[in-house]
Structure formats: structure tokens, C-alpha cells
Amino acid sequence: MKKEVYEIAADQLNKNGRIYSIDVLEKAVERYNNIESVAFGELGYQESEIVSLHNVSHVINNAFLKKERIPRKKKKQLKKTGKWIPLKKKMMVEVEFLDTINGKKAKELIDLDIDLDIGMRAVGSVVEGVVQEGLKITSFDIIMK
């Protein structure tokens, strides 16, 4: 099985015209990780919040938040100047492709150096492009970049 790690940026406009704040993502990831079952995803963008086992391509091993690392040299500069810069955070999703029809297709695309990405399948409310508290992640799907 082939493993890949994908990232979803926080606090910036995504391709769907939405902004996911780090606070909303943090709570959603925590809720998602507390579900005690195997999590699957599909190949391609899906309209339904329910994962179809017929179309499964991968298992989601881990979803977590990661802070940007500041190089040591820059940290020293920041301490000297007293300036503060906000750290960027992003959500990381580790998937493992299965030996299903769609899992094999995804692996073939990766082997051909096709740039794939991850899409979050979630339910929640959006106000003026900003995703609100209460976001519920249902899955992560592999999509074209």
C-alpha cells in the first residue's frame, strides 16, 4: 500500500472560495479523530457526505494540525527586534491507498507524476465565505490539484 501526506491550508481562501480558520479546523479535527471507526475516502470530488464503500480508494490514517517551523536564524532576528509574526498552521492528512479499483487508479496517477490533492468533505455553515464553528468533517477525498 502506498502512503501519502496532503495538506489543507488554514486562514486563507481555498479553491472553493472558503476560508477555514485555524480554530474551526482545530475543533473539527479533534471531533473527527474522536470517531472510533475506520475512515475511508474516495477518488474524486463527491457531493454526498456519506462515503460509498463501492468507490473507496484510501483509508485515512491520521489528520492533525501542524505549525510552521521558524528557522533558528530568523528566531534570533525576531527576538532582537521584538517583532512578532503569526505562525502559519495547516491541517495534514495522511492516507494509505488501498488495492481497490479506485485506489489502484490513484496510485497510477501518482506514479505518472499527476499532481493530486486532498479535499475535505464536511458539513457546516458558511457566512460570506468564512466557515463557521460546528464544522463536521465526514471524510477526505483525493482530487486533482
Image (spheres, rainbow, N blue to C red):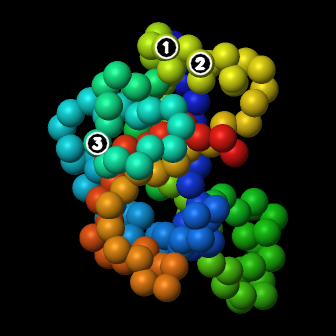
Task: Examine the image and state in which quarter residue 84 appears.
Answer: bottom right
Callout 1 touching callout 3 (CB < 8 Å) = no
Q: Note whether residue 29 is visible.
A: no
Q: x%, y% of residue 54? A: 34, 22
Element at label 3: loop
Q: CA distance from mark 3 to mark 2?
A: 21 Å
Query: What secondary structure is marked by label 1?
Result: helix
Q: Which residue is mark 2?
A: 105
The residue indicated by pointer 3 is: 50
- Residue to which mark 1 is pinned: 101
Q: Residues within 10 Å of mark 2 (few under 14, many from 20)?
A: some
Q: Earlier in the sequence, mark 1 or mark 3?
A: 3
Is residue 82 visible in the rendered image? The answer is yes
Q: Secondary structure at mark 2?
A: helix
Q: Are marks 1 and 2 in contact (CB under 8 Å)?
A: yes
At a point 44% along the width and 33% down the height, the residue shown is: 42
- Whether 143 is drawn above or below 128: the answer is above
**Observer-nearest of 40 and 95:** 40
Q: Amino acid at mark 3?
A: Ile
Report how far apart the C-alphas of labels 1 and 3 lie in the structure. Answer: 19 Å
Task: For label 1, count other residues whose C-alpha is less than 10 Å away and answer few (under 14), some (14-19) or many (20+).
Answer: few
The quarter of the picture where the C terminus appears is top right
